[in-house]
Image (cartoon, rainbow, N blue to C red):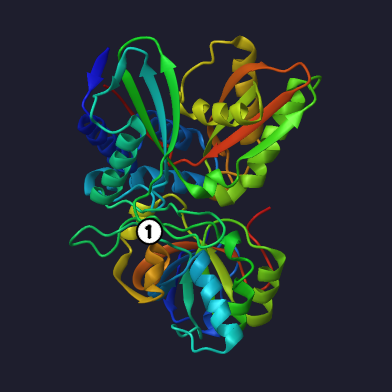
Amino acid sequence: MDEIKKLISPLTEEAIHGLKVGDEVSLSGVVYTARDMAHKRLCEAMESGTQLPIELEGAVIYFLGPSPARPGQVIGAAGPTTSSRMDAFSPRLIAGGLKAMIGKGYRGDEVRQALKNYGAVHLVTIGGAGAFLSKHIVSAEIVAYDDLGTEAIRKLEVVDFPAVVAYDSYGDSIYK
Amino acid sequence: MRYIEYEKIVSAVEALCIAAAYELPEDVLAAIEQAAKKESNPTAVKILGQLIENARIAKTEKIPLCQDTGLAVIFVEQGSQVAVEEDGGTLIDAINAGVAAGYEKGYLRKSVVAEPLNERKNTDTNTPAIIHQQTVAGDKLKLTVMAKGGGCENKSQFKMFNPTADKEQIADWVVSVVAQAGADACPPFVIGVGIGGDFELSALLSKKALLHNLDRKNSDKFYAQLETDILNKVNATGIGPQGLGGDTTALACMIEAAPCHIASLPIAVNIECHSHRHKSVIL
């Protein structure tokens, strides 16, 4: 692999187009957490024309439901959950300006098409390495859907968060 | 009859839940280390190294190995000559109280919803636990906590084969189940296979199979060979750690077999991720 590409979020169209399948990236900046229920609510809000609790333009969503932080810790373990469960919702968010998602595993054809149509990427990071990945998160606060507990949307600030481009904006996938 | 204090069982389960979340079993860590030495794919070597580093951070800094600290699956082997003290609650109550305490005090994620389809409201205690009880001889109580993640459990499968099916057909199907799990379920896996019994027993056996030490040899030569054949075929898929390619798609395949009906050959595959967390205690 080539050298690691630095990414700063929110992401620009130019940054996205510079990414190819297999690229190792190091991401810094703001990342929002969302998993199943939060995705459902975001899409329902878009359907009904309600104001979204986060700014989607250029945003990065991390498919994460962290374990609780101990006193003095920013967050508990913080690894990715399975991306494909968000397949029904991601195209809508991508059309709304979402530029990258971080998860693990495969994405369906509709997501791949949306990545291509709107210029976005799907990144994967190491599933089951929640302790290791938590070291790259420097702040975390709940910004929406507090009642969902671990599934609430959190605004994270990450530093040099490691990931690999699994699906790029050209329609390619890292998986055989 | 020997009696064990209710609170002693609660404390034991609490401690097991916490230890399971932070300490990767030595046999699992050793299997990952060995795989890293043999692995030919540089990306895979790097990922396996990160998993080893993750285990080190989890243990030393008390951060769970994985944010999905699992559904608490408890295997109970209760001697026929041992019981919970009179006036205490039931053994089931003690186990659930231990799980709730462990997940709260250990800063573990509560991942259980009270009801599956309508409201899916989190119970906020990680209970009820899934509890499998077995009566054995003696006056000891053995408790095993397995913290089972959702991502890998979601990829487990069951199939009824014709009783005339041969072991190659079985092996090929197990490999196809593993391939379908792929990157989604956090490889390298531990593969538990339940063969025989009936519909529900085969599934239970597939999970019980995961509790063996990873370097154990099946005492039955036929099944030992089938385990090796499945593991070799799985690792020949090239799926690799995190599905990004490599020789290490699974660390082990372990089979549990049981008698079954002449018409049936039930097979269940329980997919377990590399964060294979389980701890036992004998009271």
Q: Is residue B109 visible?
A: yes
Q: Position of residue A59 (x, y in %)?
A: 48, 80
Q: Residue furthest left?
A: A72
Residue at 52% from the left image edge and 88% from the top image edge: A50
Q: Is residue B244 visible?
A: no
Relative to residue B124, is residue B232 depicted above or below? Answer: above
Query: Image quarter for residue A48?
Result: bottom right
Query: B121 or B246, which lies in front?
Result: B121
Residue at 49% from the left image edge and 89% from the top image edge: A51
Query: Image quarter for residue B229?
Result: top right
Q: Position of residue B182 (x, y in %)?
A: 61, 47
Query: Image quarter for residue A166?
Result: bottom right
Relative to residue A167, is residue B1 depicted above or below? Answer: above
Q: Is residue B147 left or right of residue A58?
A: left
Relative to residue B72, is residue B251 depicted above or below? Answer: above
Label 1 environment density (alpha carbons within 10 Å; few <14, some 14–19, many ≥20): many
Residue at 50% from the left image edge and 49% from the top image edge: B150
Give the chain letter at badge 1.
Answer: A
Residue at disc 1, secondary structure: loop
Check disc 1 and give the amino acid type: Ala
Residue at 37% from the left image edge and 67% from the top image edge: A160
Q: Is residue B258 left or right of residue B151?
A: right
Relative to residue A92, is residue A126 depicted above or below? Answer: above
Q: Report which residue position mark 1 lands on.
A: A78
Q: Position of residue A28 (x, y in %)?
A: 38, 73
User: How many labels sit on residues?
Assistant: 1
Q: Position of residue A150 (x, y in %)?
A: 38, 62
Q: Is residue B273 left or right of residue B6?
A: right
